[in-house]
Image (spheres, rainbow, N blue to C red):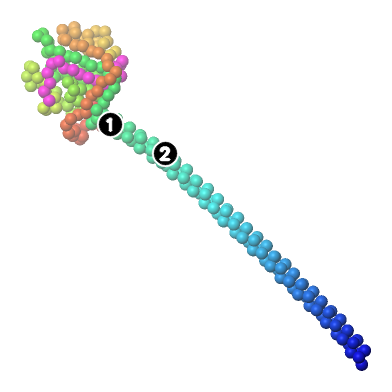
Amino acid sequence: MNKNKVVISIVFGIISIFLVAVMRIQLKTIDQTDITSLESMQEEELRNEILQLKEKNSEIENKIAENEEKINEYKETLNNNQKATELLNSELQEYEEQIGLTDVTGEGVILTLTDTDIRSYSPSNLIDFINELKYAGATAISINDNRIINTTEIVEISKKYILLNGDQRVSSPYIIKAIGDKQKMLETFNLKDEGYIDLYKNAEYDIKMEENNNITIYKYNKDINLEYIKEGEDN
């Protein structure tokens, strides 16, 4: 009996050891299966995250490209607007200069007309000089520092005084300043026997003409009624 008990105990021990070993193998297999599954799941998630990041990066790159394109469009528009603004400002400045709203400085000529006991200058003489200067390309003209514009009136109020613009009295010597191409104005006025210099000198008028590189003609100092200024006219 004792021998049988020992054999039975040994058999139970072996069986127990076998069962324990089998259980451990099963547990290990389960553990490995879970780890593999987890690793597989983690890899899949990582792949998905990488794909999502790639998609997001692609979207961001597209957004950046769109923004850069918009920025370039804005820059081009800004440049075009700036060019348009500069052109408009230039045209406005030129227009203001033409109608006498701004001071003007530049090269030109200065005529000095002086009355003598023999000859005195009349309003019609001054008008002739102004028209001839315009013909020669003058862009701004003044008489005794009074700006001449298209609506300027020049009338005689006495043998000594000439009236400009209704209330500006001027008298000899009449200093006519003109800004423009000085060479062209000099050539026009100094034509042999036909230019105003020879014509007036031959008629015994006192007249002098000189060039100057830095003439300033001041703006018209009264209100201008623009409805009387015809389109395309120059001062």
Q: Which residue is at a point 18% across and 6% down the rendered structure image?
A: 202
Looking at the image, is mark 1 or mark 2 nearer the viewer?
A: 2
Q: Could you say where residue 94 lies in the image, as x and y percent from the top left?
A: 29, 30
Compared to residue 25, the image places residue 81 above or below, namely: above
Query: Label 2: which residue?
Result: 79
Q: Is residue 51 left or right of residue 125?
A: right
Residue 170 falls in image quadrant: top left
Q: Which residue is at a point 16% across and 17% down the rendered structure image?
A: 174
First along the sequence among labels 1 and 2? 2
The quarter of the image holding the N terminus is: bottom right
Q: Is residue 177 left or right of residue 56?
A: left
What segment carries the magenta color? Answer: 168-185
Q: Which residue is at a point 52% across and 49% down the rendered structure image?
A: 64
Residue 194 visible to an observer of this rendering: yes
| Name of the residue lying farthest toward the front | 2
Q: Could you say where residue 157 lies in the image, as x and y percent from the top left?
A: 7, 21
Neighbours of disc 1 within 10 Å: few (<14), some (14-19), many (20+): some
Query: Label 1: which residue?
Result: 95
Whether the magenta-drawn stretch holds residue 159 is answered as no
Closer to us: 32 or 55: 32
